[in-house]
Image (tube, rainbow, N blue to C red):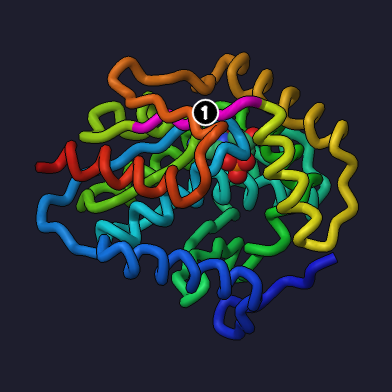
């Protein structure tokens, strides 16, 4: 069990730090890092575990944009629900007491729940499952969507989630819809959990991926769907580096 980290007092996780440094090196090696004055909104949507956040982070770093992981916001609400053992009605009433913020460290972005860094705690299977239960609640969605729209007011943002191109920023200049075969996504998630010291069973992770896809696409409120004007990227058979190059090429074609 991870312990909470105070937002002012955080020792970075060395594994994440190493991965982040590797990504920066990759971008620098390819001589791709650049800043652009043409600031747009990039909306990245797609199924769970298809690499949205890795792609969004890489693109934001390349363009010098702000990155926002909206899944982390739903996960923070899920964690609050678990910590306080809330029913749906109690959660809705407690929303004004929930303050979600981000802080940017050298190892990437961390989400804070009421001032406490909970980045590690929100990444467990338990919190992920609760996030897919609290995210269909319309009051929760309205609460978070309003904050997300505020974050994009100055553009120059890459935001990832499920409803970014359809609900949060229907007028986003660039919309990407990421997808990959469920078995490929389950294997990625399985390895991630193992790397965090958990002991996952592949069949359970696959079941979870399918379950989450169903809930994400069938809920009444803002179901996951591809925006009509989104560019679809199926990354089942791409390496991470190939995906990053591909997405950066799409971005460059778009802004020039
Ligand atoms: O991307 P993720 O696995 O961190 O997302 C956690 C949950 O939150 C997942 O069930 C989908 C949901 N979510 C959502 O409904 N809308 C978003 N914009 C982002 C995530």
Q: At x 31% / y 62%, what residue is drawn?
A: 30
Q: Name the image quarter holding the C terminus.
A: top left
Q: At x 71% / y 53%, what residue is drawn?
A: 192
Who is closer to the viewer here, 83 or 108? 108
The tally of labels here is 1
The percent position of residue 90, horizontal first and vertical second, equals: 72, 39
Left or right: 21 as drawn, with respect to 216: left
How crowded is the residue under tag 1: few (<14 C-alpha within 10 Å), some, or many (20+)? many
Query: Image quarter for residue 180?
Result: top right
Q: Magenta segment range?
A: 176-181
The percent position of residue 183, horizontal first and vertical second, equals: 71, 29
Q: At x 62% / y 14%, what residue is drawn?
A: 218
Principal secondary structure, stretch drawn in magenta: strand
Label 1's element? strand
Location of ligand 1 given as a quarter of the image? top right
Query: Image quarter for residue 216?
Result: top right
The percent position of residue 221, horizontal first and vertical second, equals: 54, 20
Q: Is residue 213 visible?
A: yes
The percent position of residue 155, horizontal first and vertical second, equals: 22, 49
Q: Which residue is mark 1?
A: 179
Who is closer to the viewer here, 147 or 242? 242
Q: Is residue 140 visible?
A: no
Left or right: 147 as drawn, with respect to 82: left
Query: Image quarter for residue 119?
Result: bottom right
Q: Is residue 78 above or below residue 224?
A: below
Q: At x 54% / y 58%, what residue is drawn?
A: 99
Q: Is residue 25 above or below residue 168?
A: below
Q: Name the image quarter holding the N terminus.
A: bottom right
């Amino acid at each position: 069990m991870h312990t909470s980290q105070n937002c002012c007092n955080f020792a970075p996780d060395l594994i994440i730090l190493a991965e982040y440094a590797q990504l920066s090196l990759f971008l620098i090696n390819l001589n791709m890092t650049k800043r652009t004055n043409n600031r747009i909104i990039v909306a990245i949507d797609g199924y769970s575990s298809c690499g949205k956040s890795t792609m969004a982070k890489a693109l934001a770093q390349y363009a010098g944009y702000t990155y926002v992981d909206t899944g982390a916001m739903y996960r923070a609400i899920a964690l609050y629900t678990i910590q306080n053992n809330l029913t749906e009605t109690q959660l809705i009433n407690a929303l004004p007491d929930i303050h979600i913020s981000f802080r940017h460290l050298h190892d990437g972005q961390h989400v804070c729940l009421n001032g406490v860094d909970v980045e590690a705690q929100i990444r467990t299977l338990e919190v992920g499952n609760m996030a897919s239960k609290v995210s269909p609640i319309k009051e929760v969605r309205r609460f978070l969507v309003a904050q997300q729209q505020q974050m994009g007011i100055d553009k120059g943002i890459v935001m990832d989630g499920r409803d970014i191109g359809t609900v949060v920023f229907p007028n986003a200049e660039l919309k990407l819809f990421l997808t990959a075969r469920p078995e490929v996504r389950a294997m990625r998630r399985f390895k991630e959990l193992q790397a965090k010291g958990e002991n996952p069973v592949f069949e359970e992770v696959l079941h979870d991926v399918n379950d989450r896809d169903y809930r994400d696409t069938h809920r009444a409120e803002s179901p996951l769907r591809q925006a009509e004007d989104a560019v679809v990227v199926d990354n089942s058979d791409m390496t991470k580096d190939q995906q990053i190059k591909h997405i950066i090429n799409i971005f460059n074609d778009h802004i020039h």
